[in-house]
Amino acid sequence: MTDAYDARDLVKTYKSGKVRALDGVSFRIEEGEIFGLLGPNGAGKSTLVGLITGLLRPDSGTLLLHGNDIVRRPHIATEIVSAMTQTSLPLGDLTVREVLRVTGHLRGMTRRDAADAAESLIERLGIAEVAGKLLNKTSGGQWRLASIATALIGDRPILVLDEPTNELDPTNRRMVWEYLRRLKQQEGRTIILVTHNVLEAERVVERVAIMHRGRIIALGTPGELKEQVDRRIRLEISLAPGAERPERDLALLGEVIPITDRHLVVLVPRGDVEAAVSRVVHQIGLERLDDFRILTPSLEDVYIEITGEAMEEAA
C-alpha cells in the first residue's frame, strides 16, 4: 500500500520557542486505513492536526501527503483533506442544509450535485429534523452530526475527525462508525480519528499512535501495543456479599491483585484462560460470585506502562 502521509521529525513550538507542542514526531499513515491519534488534552494532537490539514507549518521536519511536500505547498492539503475540528464552523449562521450545500459547492461540486449530496447525508445521518435550523442553534449532538456531514460532503479522499462522537448517544455513535467503515471499505477513504477515548480507539482504528507531551510514545495495531504491556489475561472477579474469599483456589488461577474485599483481579497466562474459567465455575462456584469478566489489557494500560501516569492525570 502507498502512504497517505509520511511525517519525519516534526517539531512545532509556540511562544517564541518556549513551548514545544511537537517534539520530533514521525509516523506513516497508509492509504485506506483508519488511523488513530490517542492521547490526553495537551499531548500535541491538535497541533498535529493543524499540520496534516495544512493550517499550520512545522518549525522543522518533513511532511508528505501523497508524496507531496505540504510544508512548502500547504494548499495541496486543502484540496484533498476534509477535517472536522472542535471549533465552530465559519458558516454557523446558515442552516444545516445551506452549510452542506455551500461547502459541497466550494469543494468543486456543481450546485445541483451539492444539493443532492446534502440531502443524502441529511437522510443518512438522521438530521432531517434540524436541516432547516441555523447550525449555531443546534444542540451538542446535532451539531456534531452536522459537522460530520460537513466533513463528508465533497468526497475528499482523506478525512480528519477530531472527537467526532463526543455528545452522541450509543445509537448514533454506532451509526456513524458503521457509515465511516463503509466509506473505507467501499471507497478506500483514509480516516484519521483524533480522540482521548480509549475504548473508541480500540474498537474502531486499525493502527494507533499514542501521544504524550508532544511525542509519539507508541505506534501499532491495538493488539500489538497491548501485547507489549502484558500478555496475560485479566479475570475480574466480584464476590457475592458475605462470600468468603477462596484464597487457595484464586492463587491457583494466577497472580491475584486485590482491589477491595469483594473485588479482585487475577492475571492469567493466555494459554491457561480456559482452565482458569473452568476452575472459577466449578471450584469457586457461580453462587459465590456477583460477576466475573475476562479482559485483555487496554490502550490505557499501554499509556500507564510507558508514562507512569493515567491518561486523565496527564490532561
Image (spheres, rainbow, N blue to C red):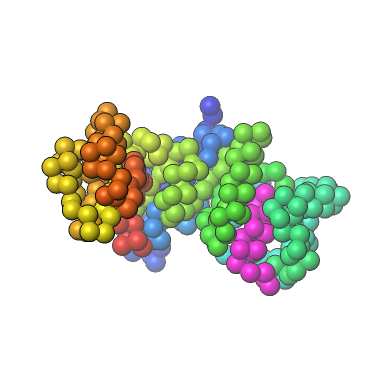
Estimate the x, y position of residue 122 in percent, counting from the top left.
Answer: 74, 54
Q: Please indicate, yes or no, whether residue 103 appears anywhere in the rendered image.
A: no
Residues drawn in magenta: 136-152
Q: Which one is in front, 102 or 301?
A: 301
Q: Which one is in front, 159 or 175?
A: 175
Q: Please indicate, yes or no, whether residue 140 appears anywhere in the rendered image.
A: yes
Q: Is residue 307 magenta?
A: no
Among the 4 quarters of the image, the one containing residue 9: top left
Estimate the x, y position of residue 16 in percent, counting from the top left.
Answer: 38, 65
> Which residue is farthest left?
248
Estimate the x, y position of residue 47 in percent, counting from the top left.
Answer: 46, 56
Among the 4 quarters of the image, the one containing residue 2: top right
> Which residue is farthest front?
287
Q: Residue at x 52, y 56 (%)?
A: 163
Estimate the x, y position of residue 156 in percent, counting from the top left.
Answer: 67, 44
Q: Residue at x 82, y 53 (%)?
A: 115
> Principal SS element in the magenta part?
helix
> Which residue is farthest right?
112
Quarter of the image containing the C terminus? bottom left
Q: Residue at x 14, y 46 (%)?
A: 247
- In the depicted structure, whether residue 285 falls above or below residue 311: above
Q: Residue at x 26, y 49 (%)?
A: 288
Q: Is residue 148 magenta?
A: yes
Residue 79 located left or right of residue 102: left
